[in-house]
Amino acid sequence: MTSAEVYEESAGTAPPGVAQVSLRRTLVPLARDPLGGFERIGRAADGRLARLNLGLTRPYLVTHPDHVQHVLRRPDLYRREGMMWKPLQRLEGDGIAGEGPSWQVSRHILQPMFTARNLGGLFGTMADAVTESLSVLQERAARGREVDLVDEMTAIAHRVLIRVLFSDRITFAEAERLGQAITAAFTSLGSRMLMPFVPDAVPMPGDRPFARAVRTVDELIYPRIRACRAEGSRGDDLVAVLARTVGEDGQLLDDKRVRDDVVSMFVAGTETTGLALTWLWLLLQEHPEVREQVVAEVADVVGDGPAAPQHLPGLVFTRMVLQEALRLYPVGWVVPRTLAQPDELAGTRLSAGTTVLLSPYLTHRVPQFWDEPEAFRPQRFSPDREQRRHRFAYFPFGAGVHQCLGSHFFTVEAQLIVAGMLSRFRPRVAGEVSLRPRATASLRPRQRARMVLDPAA
Ligand code: HEM
């Protein structure tokens, strides 16, 4: 679709400056290839608002950084409700994954755990968990056996998160079961995400596997919360901190609220990390010149390992590569909001209840802000160039009051994992590499990727 076509359709029906995309041009491409459809619409809108006709809902697609800034700076107006959030809240509740007073309580409690200062004290534990995970991976990958890239990267993320945030309150085997159940719950939410207006009482495909997955999650988490309360734990792990938190009603958070935030943190911090690392290895396979530069940096800074917190300041290029990978493949590819009161955005009057879709995936490709946006160029993130960018042209971790709590956690963890892997192995992706993404709630590779881990030396 060309931008002229979008413009033509806007004549007469859409407000000035808004590209209106018809039902036929929206639903057919979106049903066939949701992300490709969004990409074509985003390209044609070229920074203007685009109004999508999805039949019952007509969300606005927002790609220009100025408009993204407007939305994310007004959380009182643009709220995390409706669309994707309603089904997700069936799994995660409405604490840190929600909105309003209960979100505020959770944010207030969790934020101090993620400050640079507090995390700084945990990097040693994080590095140990990475080293331990890589030893497990080394055993699995012995003698040139192929391993599943997404599964292995996610398994490392599970192990690190439980060591750092749960201080072993959950075993690794339990974390893997929890991860599988959460993935199953996510996958079965598909039709409710597409049709969030269908009441919970109306059965929909995926409801049964969803209920089963939630039962597994609950069976794993509730006993940990009860045990923690029974022992009167003063620990500083996530469960203990939440279990002694006083809520907005002046009472201790009940077990359900603690469970909701524990699950939310697990969801937010593991699949995202596993997928971001997966994209990184796929990109490095496709760009051997960049890979060699990372290998050289790791050899120089870490040697033959293990990677440790004191190596982090030296891993500058590794960090740039991670940032560029998250530009091209931001795992949280869409950030939906619902308008609470009428507002004017980009000169367009929007009514209360309108859905607004922000998409880091699309904004990270607007040519006005990114030269050759499809090219993989870590140099874009060299420290001297970062200052010159529009603050909202790059937001893989969101921005504003809901900005990702784990962005620093992720960056350090990922640097340690990449450096640790390269000091032990020469990872290569087996077979043909496909960088085609599939957009579910997160951005994952369309094809299963397998990795071979040859020894580094
Ligand atoms: C590549 C890794 C990650 C990506 C791409 C990512 C992305 C995001 C995005 C886009 C949001 C904003 C959602 C919104 O505005 O509605 C978010 C929120 C959040 N993230 Fe992350 N995230 C990552 C890793 C992590 C990790 C490792 C953790 C925790 C250990 C974490 C915890 C959270 C939490 C708690 C929120 C909700 C914050 C709030 O609403 O107050 N994330 N993340």
Image (spheres, grey):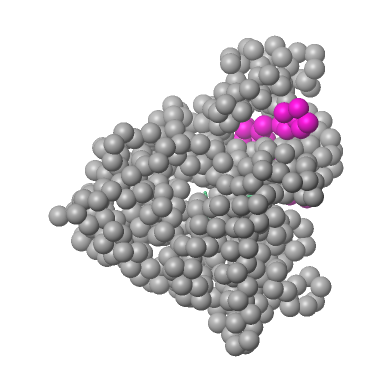
Judge from the rendering whether residue 136 lies leftward or rightward of residue 184; answer left or right.
left
Judge from the rendering whether residue 225 lies leftward or rightward of residue 256; answer left or right.
left
Q: Seen from this angle, which residue lies furthest bottom?
A: 231
Closest to the observer, 130 or 227:
227
Determine the image quadrant of residue 245: bottom right
In the rendered image, residue 205 lying in the magenta stretch gets the answer: no
Let me know if residue 64 appears in the view: yes
Q: From what the image shows, is residue 171 above or below residue 158?
A: below
Let me know if residue 386 appears in the view: no
The count of marks equals 0
Judge from the rendering whether residue 130 lies leftward or rightward of residue 335; answer left or right.
left
Residue 161 location (% of width, % of height): 47, 65
- Ligand 1 found in image quarter: bottom right
Q: From what the image shows, is residue 108 above or below residue 337?
A: below
Q: Quadrant of the C terminus?
A: bottom left
At 62% from the left edge and 67% from the top edge, which residue is drawn? 218
Closest to the observer, 449 or 250:
449
What's the magenta region? Answer: 54-77
At 73% from the left edge and 25% from the top edge, which residue is drawn? 53
Residue 443 location (% of width, % of height): 51, 41
In the rendered image, residue 69 lying in the magenta stretch gets the answer: yes
